[in-house]
């Protein structure tokens, strides 16, 4: 059963990983189809689902990996701290190397501290500590509700739904990290502000989302037949989605602040997607069609690092002073007579390149984990 579950879980991780590569690597950032862009502020696009899908999948994976913990508390804490620190450091190095490859500069005074892997690192650490202390699904569910409700109140009291420098999310991050270490967003009028979409304060609801994934995986570890367990989680996913959509009239869906309803809706979508995958892969034993997703999901960290650096490294190769990726994109534009479609095909081509690595690692039973 554990192996079967991991097939569908790898599929969910793989879907998120492929989505990340697609939306993060267009041929041109100036020519992107609207569904492949993040919401400017309130709202939800397909692209906004990618990161929370991965967050939710991480929570589910934690539930499977810790369900039979027998290690001493000190050993468990050492393992958790090691993973968390390594993940955070890898995230920082990716940011540093990416900046160096783009600009040729190593500037620590303006190094962005937070990012995708850094947020995953902190969320993993906090949830690992919570589940070590808090026992039972009902109590864990109460913790999730408390985190999301408390964060909602913070947003209401601190202008959290205003896209401005006075937003409590931006204010707290500037106070804790410093303006020079934050991502620079641009307001609709073009004004730049220090506003990190993966900042510290907005990691609170991300912790709740990881814990939601953990709870769902624990609900699978019952004596019920597999079809009943899958159906049960499908119902929970639908309830999360519908309740999040209803509450969004009071608490808008917003990825940049990771609003409480954003957690509910994206967790609902992720859980429903997982139940479909589990139904076919685990129950019906029909997973051959999803091999690319399994290959991506089995080495998600390695693929994320590779996809984040490879294109920048290839860009160091130039033809008549033009970076090689740009040369390829211009070729696609001339062949396809459309910049948006050329940009999309470029991203799909890069996914195929990343799949070559994923396939090679999977066939050799190489699984890179922390």
Image (spheres, grey):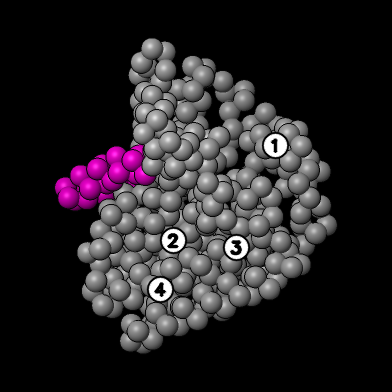
Q: Secondary structure at mark 3?
A: helix
Question: Which mark lies nearer to you, 2 or 4?
Answer: 4
Q: Residues within 10 Å of mark 2 (few under 14, many from 20)?
A: many
Residue denoted by label 1: 186
Residue 310 in percent (x, y) is at 36, 31
> What residue is shown at x 46% (from left), y 78% (from top)?
234
Question: Residue 57 has which mark?
Answer: 2
* Quadrant occupied by the N terminus: bottom left
Of all residues, the one furthest to the left in this rendering is 364
On the rendered structure, is 41 left or right of 95? right
Question: Which mark lies nearer to you, 2 or 1?
Answer: 1
Residue denoted by label 3: 263
Q: Residues within 10 Å of mark 4 (few under 14, many from 20)?
A: many
Q: Earlier in the sequence, mark 4 or mark 3?
A: 3
Residue denoted by label 4: 275
Residue 71 in percent (x, y) is at 36, 62
Looking at the rendering, the stretch of residues picked out in magenta corresponds to 348-370
């Amino acid at each position: 059963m554990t192996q079967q579950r991991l097939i569908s879980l790898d599929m969910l991780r793989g879907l998120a990983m492929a989505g990340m590569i697609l939306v993060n690597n267009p041929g041109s950032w100036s020519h992107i189809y609207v569904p492949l862009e993040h919401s400017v502020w309130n709202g939800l696009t397909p692209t906004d689902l990618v990161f929370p899908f991965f967050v939710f999948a991480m929570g589910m994976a934690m539930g499977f990996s810790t369900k039979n913990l027998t290690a001493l508390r000190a050993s468990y804490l050492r393992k958790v701290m090691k993973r968390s620190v390594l993940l955070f450091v890898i995230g920082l190095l990716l940011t540093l190397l990416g900046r160096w490859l783009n600009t040729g500069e190593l500037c620590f005074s303006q190094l962005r501290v937070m990012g995708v892997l850094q947020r995953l690192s902190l969320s993993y650490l906090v949830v690992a500590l919570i589940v070590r202390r808090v026992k039972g699904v009902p109590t864990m569910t109460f913790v999730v509700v408390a985190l999301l409700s408390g964060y909602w109140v913070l947003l209401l009291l601190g202008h959290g739904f205003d896209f401005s420098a006075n937003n409590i999310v931006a204010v707290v991050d500037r106070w804790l990290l410093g303006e020079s270490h934050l991502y620079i967003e641009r307001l609709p009028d073009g004004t730049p502000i220090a506003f990190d979409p993966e900042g510290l304060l907005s990691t609170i609801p991300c912790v709740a989302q990881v814990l939601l994934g953990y709870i769902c995986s624990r609900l699978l570890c019952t004596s019920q037949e597999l079809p009943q367990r899958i159906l049960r989680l499908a119902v929970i996913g639908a309830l999360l989605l519908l309740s999040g959509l209803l509450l969004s009239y009071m608490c808008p869906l917003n990825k940049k602040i990771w609003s409480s309803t954003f957690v509910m809706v994206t967790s609902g979508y992720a859980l429903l997607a997982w139940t479909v995958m589990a139904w076919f892969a685990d129950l019906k034993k029909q997973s051959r069609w999803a091999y690319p997703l399994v290959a991506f999901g089995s080495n998600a960290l390695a693929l994320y690092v590779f996809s984040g650096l490879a294109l920048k490294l290839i860009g160091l190769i130039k033809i008549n002073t033009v970076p090689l990726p740009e040369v390829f994109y211009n070729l696609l534009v001339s062949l396809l007579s459309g910049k948006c479609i050329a940009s999309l095909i470029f991203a799909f081509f890069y996914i195929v390149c990343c799949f070559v690595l994923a396939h090679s690692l999977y066939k050799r039973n190489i699984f890179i984990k922390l």
